[in-house]
Structure formats: C-alpha cells, structure tokens
Amino acid sequence: MKTSEFYELSFDKFGLKVPKGYWFAGYDTWAKVDGNQATVGITDFLQTKMGDVAFFTPSEDQVLEQDDVLGTIESIKATIDLTIPVSGKVIRFNPQLVDHPEIISNDAYGDGWIVELELSDWEGDKAMLLPSEKYFELMQDKVKNALAD
Amino acid sequence: MSAKDDVLPELEERYQLYLGMPRQFIPWYPTIDAEKCIGCKKCMDFCHDTVYAFVEADKKVIVQDRWHCQVYCQSCTHACPKDAITFPERADVKAAIRELRQKYPAY
C-alpha cells in the first residue's frame, strides 16, 4: 500500500508525517477507507515512541468493534495492546507481519498496515475519529509534550 | 442546566481534552489492587504519563492522576508481574464517549 501526500512537522531533530486522506483515533491507530473496506495501522508517532517492533500478535476475533483490542505489539521498549478505530469483519491481517514485523517501524502508513476489514458501521465510527488535518493539529501539541518528557 | 453543565467550561479550560472532549468525563483509568501490589514500580517504568506514584511509607504504587491515563491504553497491565492492575470494561467507556461526542462534535 502506498501513500502519497503528507502533512509534515518537525521539532528540532524530531520529524513527523501525517498522511492526507486517513482517519485517526485518539489511541494512535489509523484507518484508510475505500468504499466499504478499510485498512488499519498504527501511527508514525506511536511507532516512533515504541522503537523497533519485534512481534505482532493479532486478535483471534474475526469481527471487531471500534475500540476493541486489535492485537498486541511488542517492541524493544514495551508491549502494548492496539485498539481498532473502526468496526467490521476481518478480511486479513497483514501476512508480512508474521516474518517481518519490523515493516511497521519502517512504513507505518504503507506496507506496515496491520489489518483489512469489511466495514460494518462506518458512519457511526467516523463520528469518533479525526480526519488527517484535525489529527495533524492535535499532534503538534502531543509531539511537544512527548519531547518535553 | 445540570451540575455537569455548570462545571464544563471550567473543565475545558483547566484540563486536557480527549479528541475535543473533557478527559475527566471519560471513565478510563487503572485501579491497583493494593493486596497484590509488591511495589516493584514496573508500571511506573512503563507509563510516562505520571499516572502512578510510589508511596514510600507503604512500599506500594498508587494511582496518582488517573486523568493522565491514555484512553484505552492498558499496556501497563503487561508490565505488572502480579496482575494487580485492572481497567473498566471497554464497552462501558465506549458508551460514555459516544454520549459525550453528541455534546462535543469532533469537527
């Protein structure tokens, strides 16, 4: 999966990209919607905070609701539960993550996608998400706070 | 006007928002079972959001600022070797957030 245009920001040596045309949750996962299907992944901000991803363990559920646990990701720094931003039926988890979970770190908005779903309540889910431009505004404060830690 | 309406402006001004909604109205935060906590501080090492604090007198960790907890993050549970940390049911929190969203549209 390829992304094209980005909003970009940088503070000192820290750079961040937010792709246009995506939808974002407050818990650092995104959804790219195409018709009645969506691709979901983690944000560049989260992968930067986590460091190199070593493992991804998907949820065993085939039907997921917005805000359910999507799977568990392990990096050199932490183990975290990912939360899914949209509801739907799982089409497939990214097969490349089995042998190459590091692609999440290398390309969080593209080849490092995590799951594809057939959407079940996009209009309802959308009300809880931010479009790219609003997420980009939010991130400017978030990045400043993270750098201040 | 309800009591909630009265305090909203103050909360909005004073506290962090979660996607435009006052964080204090979203009931997502950890609870520590003090009987299980052994004071190892692994939750504090994991969480950089100042949610937890160590009480020297008790040699235990407490939840110092629950509203600093990231909504739906429960990853500190993986760090705790004694399963002493629990979170509310996601379904309950989801319902609360959807109700709030009616009052605070995202855009």
Image (tube, coloured by chain):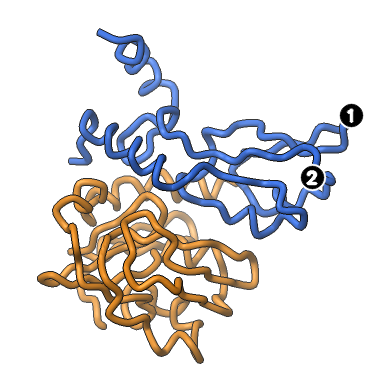
Considering only vertical position in the picture, is B12 above or below A12? above
Q: Amino acid at mark 1?
A: Ala
Towards the viewer: B19 or A65: A65
Disc 1 secondary structure class: loop
Residue plotted at (55% across, 65% down): A50
Residue plotted at (82% across, 50% down): B40
The chain identifier of the residue carrying mark 2 reads B
Q: Dot 1: few (<14), some (14–19), or many (≥20) neighbours within 10 Å?
A: few
Towards the viewer: A93 or A105: A93
Residue plotted at (49% across, 39% down): B28
Residue B44 visible to an observer of this rendering: no
- The location of residue B96, given as percent across then percent down, is 35, 35
Residue furthest to the left: A35
Q: Which residue is mark 2?
A: B36
The blue one among the chains is B
Q: Quadrant of the N terminus of chain A?
A: bottom left
**Label of residue B57 in the image:** 1
The orange one among the chains is A
